[in-house]
Image (cartoon, rainbow, N blue to C red):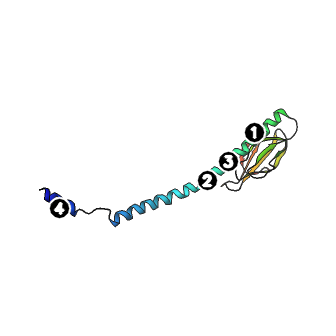
Amino acid sequence: MIARIRKGLEKKDQGFTLIELLVVMIIIGILAAVAIPIFLSQRAKAQDTAAKADVSTIGKEVATWFVDHIGMPTVTQPGGIGTDYFIGADSIGNASANVSLVGSIVGTDSTDWCVAVVNTEGSIQNFEYSAQDGLQEGNCT
């Protein structure tokens, strides 16, 4: 009896068939085809979020400026893309990568102003923050 079981075990094939391997490869290919575009769009969404955060920070700092000062502030980014933003002579934070200020603040007084940033790497490249409408897509007009 033991000899018969041993003989049966020796004849048993080990490993996967070609069909099983092909099915697994097809499933992996389908999963990759679905996951890669989703992953690539996440990078652009992160860039958009960075630009929104930057313009919101600048906008809130400008609103705060009007509480403590008289007259229009000057918002600059003297070092260019990725460097500190300044309101007057005070630094208000470091810009995110690929985000830069569009010009300076646009407006006439504390109820009519707008500031904008551009992000060349995002899916939405322009964001503005204004006294009247808050955060929006687009440039100050």
Q: Residue 50 carries which label?
A: 3
Residue pointed to by mark 1: 60
Q: Earlier along the polypeptide chain: callout 3 or callout 2?
A: 2
Q: Which mark is residue 43?
A: 2
Nearer to us of marks 2 and 1 is 2
Q: How far is the residue under mark 4 from the one under mark 1?
A: 81 Å
Nearer to us of marks 4 and 3 is 4
> Image point 70% across, 56% down: which residue?
120
Disc 2 element: helix
Amino acid type, label 2: Arg
In the rendered image, residue 42, in percent from the top left (x then y), is placed at 59, 52
Nearer to us of marks 1 and 3 is 3
Quarter holding the N terminus is: bottom left
Q: How far is the residue under mark 4 from the one under mark 2?
A: 59 Å
Disc 4 element: helix
- Which image quadrant is residue 131 in? top right
Task: Name above or below for residue 101 compared with residue 70.
Answer: below
Q: Earlier along the polypeptide chain: callout 4 or callout 3?
A: 4
Residue pointed to by mark 4: 7
Amino acid type, label 3: Ala
Q: Earlier along the polypeptide chain: callout 4 or callout 1?
A: 4
Spot the residue most to the bottom: 18
Disc 1 element: helix
Label 3 crowd (10 A; few <14 / some 14-19 / many >=20): some
In the rendered image, residue 132, in percent from the top left (x then y), is placed at 77, 41
Q: Earlier along the polypeptide chain: callout 4 or callout 2?
A: 4
